[in-house]
Image: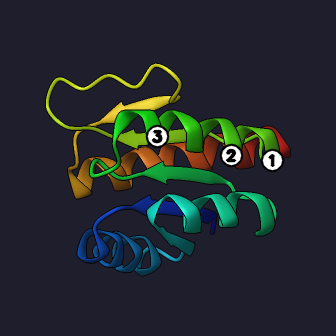
Amino acid sequence: MARILSVSYDKSLLSTREMLLRSRGHEVVSGFGFNEALKHCENSGNFDLFILGHSIPQLDKDALISAFRAKCNAPVVALTKVGERIASADFALEPDPEELLRLVQRLIGKRRAAAD
């Protein structure tokens, strides 16, 4: 369905998110840590969506979002800690798998409709 770049500083959360998104038919490229995520932003082509895990410090989230936006014109979803705000993200939500899947489905649907 969609090509998604998912980034986290926690390997188990990254793996769980990848399995969850793949179970819904999405192609997922996972980036562990800042450098790996930056490499994927710069070298892996176009993505339909960028998801940043809540384990990433805010300054790193902002830097990764800037790098991603330089290469792709796709929505950015930042998973946040309670009370955290990420102004540079298109969408921010606390980590809830069902809510994330609903948002991904809605965003991918909008992108597909706009492309037609």
Who comes first in sequence, dot 3 or dot 2? 3
* Residue drawn at x 51%, y 72% as measured from the top left: 30
At label 1, the amino acid type is Lys
Pointer 1 residue: 71
Q: Residues within 10 Å of mark 1 (few under 14, many from 20)?
A: some
Mark 2 neighbour class, 10 Å CA radius: few under 14, some 14 to 19, many 20 or more: many
Of circles 1 and 3, the one toward us is 3
Real-space Cα separation, disc 1 to disc 3, in angstroms: 16 Å
Circle 3: residue type: Lys
Q: Is residue 88 above or below residue 7?
A: above
Quickly name the residue at label 3: 61
Q: Secondary structure at mark 2?
A: helix
The answer to whether marks 1 and 2 mark residues whose Cβ atoms lie closer than 8 Å is yes
Decide if residue 27 is on the left or right side of residue 80.
Answer: right
Residue positioned most to the right: 116
Q: CA distance from mark 3 to mark 2?
A: 10 Å
Name the one closer to the observer, 99 or 16.
Answer: 16
Against 44, residue 19 (above or below) is below
For image coordinates 63% across by 58% down, the residue present is 38
State yes or no: discs 3 and 2 in contact (Cβ < 8 Å). Answer: no
Q: Residue 42: where, in percent of width, then height?
A: 77, 59
Q: Dot 2 corresponds to which residue?
A: 68
- Secondary structure of residue under mark 3: helix
Q: Amino acid at mark 2?
A: Phe
Q: Nearer the viewer, residue 110 or 93?
A: 93
Measured from the top left, where is residue 91 in percent x and y?
45, 31
Contact check, label 1 and label 3, Cβ < 8 Å:
no
Q: CA distance from mark 1 to mark 2?
A: 5 Å
